[in-house]
Amino acid sequence: MKLIDFIQSVLIKKIGRTSTAIDLSFKYGFTSGVLMDYVYQNRSSGKYFIGKLIDRIFLNNIGWQAVRERKSNLMQCIMQIIDNKGRLNIFDMACGPGSYLIDALSQRNSNKIKVICQDLNDDSLKTIKTRLDKASIYNAKLVKGSLFDKIDSNKSDLVIVAGVYEWMINDDDVKRSMAVVESQLEPGGDFLFTHLSGHKQLSMVENTFIDFNQDPVRMKIRDNRSIAMWAEELNLIIYKQIQDENGLHTVTWCKKK
Ligand SMILES: C[S@@+](CC[C@H](N)C(=O)[O-])C[C@H]1O[C@@H](n2cnc3c(N)ncnc32)[C@H](O)[C@@H]1O
């Protein structure tokens, strides 16, 4: 770890928890939907002046800017798919609090859309339920489950796996998840997934923060072409890949033949 990263890591652990974001990251995990949601909202808060200041610096980090761009890129793809198809079944396999999905649905007529929101985490499911109700989206089913589980009935026109492959260190787990998605999709169905294509402070993050299982955070950078090839091996056709302006997070849009 570089000296500057080491100093940052010590400061984060000592006084960082006055910042709401850093406190959430230790309570729920750096990879949790709760933190992701706070990052999307991008409104700084914390204890005392110092907490608010650290929170703003944390939220302004280039990595979180890229995550917010990823959300916006995902939303654009979701809205385009809705516009193309009109009536469709959407399955978000690890939804977290689901901001991109609800924000996209809120901008479209959601009456013809059925949604399944799945996550392992109860808090995320409770949050998304409240948000769906608030947005008057009633055709949604909440499922507590894993993205590795097969679901055989009710195939989907759009499957989303966002903010997950970034933390999956084992390539075989990503391929296994993609195979589940492929079997879940209708012919002609769309698959949107995200992955990490770059990071400026990976060793500092891994040495400082914990994941949602309270283990040290691990993230894996993958190049766009290799991850696209895994989808192609399953006969999914890559339609496009969209990156944030610093090339840290990629949204891949592919289609089942
Ligand atoms: C970083 S959050 C991303 C949430 C949301 N998809 C987004 O991009 O804003 C990761 C989410 O994946 C969930 N998760 C992790 N492993 C999972 C698994 N095997 N199956 C389903 N959900 C999982 C976590 O509970 C968490 O809500």
Image (cartoon, rainbow, N blue to C red):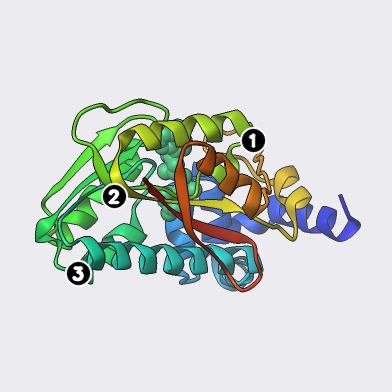
User: Which residue is drawn at the image coordinates 21% and 67% (left, top)?
Assistant: 106
Instruction: Tell me which label, 2 or 1, sits earlier in the chain.
Output: 2
Q: Quadrant of ligand 1?
A: top left
- Which quadrant of the figure has residue 181? top left
Q: Name the residue beneath numbered marker 1.
A: 169
Question: Which element carries disc 1, helix, strand or loop?
Answer: loop
Q: Which mark is residue 108?
A: 3
- Tell which tag, 2 or 1, sits nearer the viewer: 1
Q: Outermost residue toward the right? A: 3
- Percent x, y for residue 123? 34, 41
Question: Callout 1, which amino acid?
Answer: Ile
Q: Does 180 sit left or right of 168 as displayed?
A: left
- Separation of residues labelled 2 and 3 (CA atoms): 21 Å
Image vertical order of residue 201 relative to residue 76, above or below: above
Q: Nearer the viewer, residue 225 or 124?
A: 225
Instruction: Tell me which label, 2 or 3, sits earlier in the chain.
Output: 3
Q: Name the residue beneath numbered marker 2.
A: 127
Question: Callout 2, which amino acid?
Answer: Thr
- Percent x, y for residue 84? 25, 65
Instruction: Tell me which label, 3 or 1, sits earlier in the chain.
Output: 3
